[in-house]
Amino acid sequence: MAISFNAATLLNGNGIDVNTLVSQIQSQESGQLTIWQQQQSDLQTQASALSNLNTDLSNLATAVNTLTDPLGALTAMTATSSMPGILTATAQSSAATANHVIVVSSLASAGTVYTDAVAGGADASILPSGAAAGDLKLQIGGSHGATENIPITAGSNDTLSSLVSYINQQSATNTWGVTAAVLNDASGARLAIYSQASGTPGALAITGNTTTDGNGNDTGNPTLLTFEKPVGGSDASLTIDGIPFSSTSNTVTGAIPGVTLNLISAEPDVPLQLTVGADTTQASTAINAFVVAYNALTAAINQQFTVDPTSNTEGPLGSDSSLRSLQSSLFADVNYSISGNSGFVNLASLGVNMNNDGTLTVVNTTLNNALSSNPSAVLNFFQNATQSFGNHFSSDLTNLTDPVNGLLNLDLAQNSTEQSDLSTQISNFQDQLATQKQQLINQYSEVNATLEEYPYLLAEVTAQLGNILPTSSNTSPTQGTIATSSTTSGTSGS
C-alpha cells in the first residue's frame, strides 16, 4: 500500500513522525522475512517430529535385538523348586531342560570358637596370678589348615576387649579371615571368634592355650582361657538324583551344569523336585515389548499421514517420501515368513496379529501355548542362522537407524542444512534492513527539520514584505496589505 501525506497539514511546524514513517516503509519491504521465518518454523516442527520418530525407531531396534540376542530373553532358562523353603535355584541359558530330585541333608556353616565367662568382665586381665604373658594358637581351615599364633602380653592385650582388637587387627593385616567379639550375657563376658568362611575352610580350633612367667617359663596353669568345643565349620551335604554332593558354601554351582542351587534349610528326609526349562515369562515379555515398540512407531507414522478435518492438512511430515519408504519397509519386515518350523512361520502363527491400521495385537493365550509347547521352534523363528524373522528385521533396522545413511537421519541432516541456510538469509536480510532503517531515518530527519522550520521562514518573509511596502493615510484599506492565514497541525497519513 502506498504512503501519502496531506500537504495542507505538513506546514504547521510539527513536521512528520520519522520513526513511524520509516517503519511503514520497511514493513512493505520485509514480507520476504516473514516468509523465511515461517519456513524456518516449519522446518523446526519437522525436525522435532523426525527426532521423535527416530527415537521410536531406535526403541524398536532395541526390542528386536532383544529377540535376536543368543543370550537374551528367548534363550533364558528357569529353575523351579517344589519346596523353595528348602532350596531355590537359578538357571543360565546353557542349562538343559530336565527334572531333578534333590535332598538337602545339611547346610554349610561357618566355624566358631568361644570361651566361658571371664571373671572381672571384659576389661579385666585374663592372665592368672603369677603369669606375665600367654599364648593362644588358632587353627583355621580344619585339621590341615594354617595355625596362627596369638601372643598375650600383660598391659597390652591381656583383657577381652584389647584381645579382640588385637585379633581383628591381625586378621585384617594378615588375612586370617576371622572376626573376634566380646559377648556379654547373664553369665558374664566371653570371647568369641567367628570364621568369615563357611564349610571346612571356615572350621576353627584352639590348638594352643598356655601362660608363662616373667622369664618365659610355663607357669603350669593348664589354660589361659577356657574354650568350649568348636562349632560349625562343616560342609553342606546333599544328593541330586541319588548322587551325593558336598559343598563348602550354601550356594552350589557345578552340581547341575548351568544351574546354581541356593540351599535354604536342611531336610534330610524330604526329597524335592527341581524343574529346569525355558523361561516362558521372559520370552513372552520380550515379544510383547517388541509389539509395544512397533505399535508406537507405526502410530506415530500414521499420525503424519492423517488429515486434520479442521485445517484439511496432513502432519508436518505428510509429504515426506522417506517416511513412506520407512512405512513400507516396516510393513514388509513385520509380515516376513519362514518355511517349515513346525508351523511357526510368521507372527500370526504365534498369536501376534495385524490390525487394519498396521499395528499389532498379541493373543497371549496363543503365544504362551506356543512358548510352552515348542519353545525351540519359537526361538528358531526369531534366531535361525540361515533364515529368521528376527535376523531379517534386525538387518533392516541396522540400515534404517544408520547414523549417517539411515532414512530419518538423512532427513534430519537435510533439514539441518536448510535451517542453517535460512538462518544465514534471515540474518543477512535483517542486517540490510537495519542499515536501510538508519539511512531512512537520516534522510527523513532532514526533511522533517525543513518542515519544522517552514512557519518561521514564512513569518520572516511576511515581516520583511510588510516593511518594504509604503504606508499612507490616503491608502485604501485593502491596498498594500498581505493577508496571512493561520496554519493547522499537519500529520502524515497513509
Image (tube, rainbow, N blue to C red):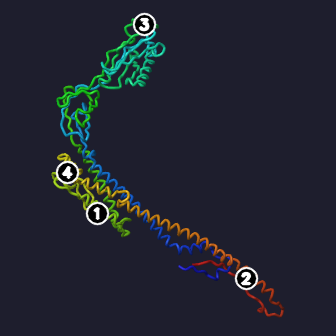
Instruction: Tell us which disc is closer to us: 3 or 4.
Output: 3
**Residue assigned mark 2:** 458
Residue 329 appears at what percent x and percent y?
28, 61
23 displayed left or right of 349: right
Earlier in the chain: of badge 3 and badge 1, it is 3
Work out how far the residue at label 2 is from the one at label 3, CA to CA, in angstroms: 137 Å
**Residue assigned mark 1:** 328
**Residue assigned mark 3:** 217
Instruction: Tell us which disc is closer to us: 2 or 3.
Output: 3
What amino acid type is highlighted by mark number 1? Ser
- 488 is higher (above) or lower (below) than 324: below
What element does badge 1 sit on? helix
What amino acid type is highlighted by mark number 4? Thr
**Residue assigned mark 4:** 366
Crowding around mark 4 (Cα neighbors within 10 Å: few <14, some 14 to 19, many 20+) is some
Residue 35 appears at what percent x and percent y?
47, 70
Work out how far the residue at label 1 is from the one at label 4, CA to CA, in angstroms: 27 Å
Work out how far the residue at label 2 is from the one at label 1, CA to CA, in angstroms: 82 Å
Crowding around mark 2 (Cα neighbors within 10 Å: few <14, some 14 to 19, many 20+) is few
18 displayed left or right of 283: right
Crowding around mark 1 (Cα neighbors within 10 Å: few <14, some 14 to 19, many 20+) is few
Q: Which residue is the extreme one toward the right?
A: 473
- 127 is higher (above) or lower (below) than 343: above
Could you tell me if the residues under marks 1 and 4 are in contact, i.e. CB atoms within 8 Å?
Answer: no
